[in-house]
Image (cartoon, rainbow, N blue to C red):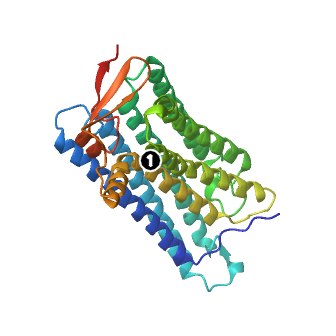
Amino acid sequence: MVYTDIHLPLMGFIALDWCLMIFALGVILLRFAVRHRGARLIPGLPTPVNSRAAILSDIFLTTSWLAGMVLILINTWKNHLRFKFRHDDPAQLYYGVPKHMAAHLLYVSWLSLYFIYISLYLAKAAFIAFYYDLFFSHSKKMQIMLMGTSIFTFLTFMVQIMLLSFWCQPTKLNWNVDGHLCSAVHNLQSVTISTFTNVATDLLILAIPIMIFTSLSHSLSKREIYGLVFVFIIGSISITAALARFVALKLIEHVPRAEVTHTIDIWALVEIVASLIAVSLPALRVLLRRGSSEARGTPSDDGETRSSSIGSGTKLAVPKDESEALGVDTANVRLETVA
């Protein structure tokens, strides 16, 4: 079986790129709006809205989106350039452009790969910072888990950067059009290392809330459980996208100069957008809860506080208004010793 690249008009690729990133921006802005409202209601408290870890999470999320936009701008430039030569003789083109322009296009494409991993790993860092804010004081075991995950994520990020920088030597082979063309993202060995370190990082990050919410499962409503499952599903889309890229490259392993540029670009974008949305969703759960409650004509929560137990001997009491403003039930917690 031989894989063929995704077929879509070049202007269609440009439109798809921008639509997905604008949609991700809309979700991010909603997250900021919900969290900002919580910060106004409870100023001065180290809540998940205004703590250092939460602010750092917002910074990571914003810069992740900006890095993704750099990738989109480069892809837009590449596809627009190819569009100009769409009617030329394919035999005279190299990666969709005249050969004298191909080296520059490949050089810029190589640089754009860095922004894929910068965007992806900044989104992972935003997730981890969010977890630090909610769960770091939970237990010694959770502190070790969070610190270990942070270190592992940084190390796997450095693996991605080193693969891009040093897999092809000399480096100029990444844009060589006169001889052997080398690329870390087209080499199956390099892609195998990249994919499985990336997926391992995602699985480790997803394992943190699973550990916490397993202990909370007896106190969560069905709606909250469904919401958490939905967040995990969105987060797993990035894993699926990474594996899809790997499968595509596996299928063209022995096909010389197989063009899978669009496959790599599309799945990379899906992975980035899914990560951005997954980071933003926990803070947006309050909007879904309110909408459901208003449709039924009932309050979003019964009583003025929500309480749940985490671990042994500790109960979390969350004021209703503050919890809704934050969009997470573990926000602004008051620790009470349970006899």
Q: Is residue 338 above or below residue 29?
A: above
Amino acid type at mark 1: Arg
| Residue under label 1 | 223
Furthest residue in direction top, as rendered: 339
Q: Residue at image x 63%, y 55%? A: 174
Q: Residue at image x 31%, y 44%? A: 301
Q: Nearer the viewer, residue 183 or 103?
A: 183
164 to the left or right of 137: right
Q: Nearer the viewer, residue 329 or 135?
A: 329
- Give the total number of marks visible in the rendering: 1
Q: Is residue 339 above or below residue 58?
A: above
Task: Give x and y (percent) for residue 241.
Answer: 60, 54
On the question of residue 62 being in view, the answer is: no
Q: Nearer the viewer, residue 151 or 20?
A: 20
Q: Residue at image x 64%, y 45%? A: 195
Q: Quadrant of residue 268?
A: bottom right
Task: Give x and y (percent) for residue 288.
Answer: 37, 54
Task: Give x and y (percent) for residue 188.
Answer: 73, 49
Q: Residue at image x 47%, y 47%? A: 118
Q: Secondary structure at mark 1?
A: helix
On the question of residue 3 being in view, the answer is: yes
Quadrant of image for the C terminus: top left
Q: Is residue 71 above or below residue 52?
A: below
Task: Give x and y (percent) for residue 337.
Answer: 32, 16
61 to the left or right of 41: right
Quadrant of image for the N terminus: bottom right
Q: Is residue 133 above or below residue 77?
A: above
Tell me the crowding category of disc 1: few under 14, some 14 to 19, or many 20 or more residues within 10 angstroms, Cα based.
few
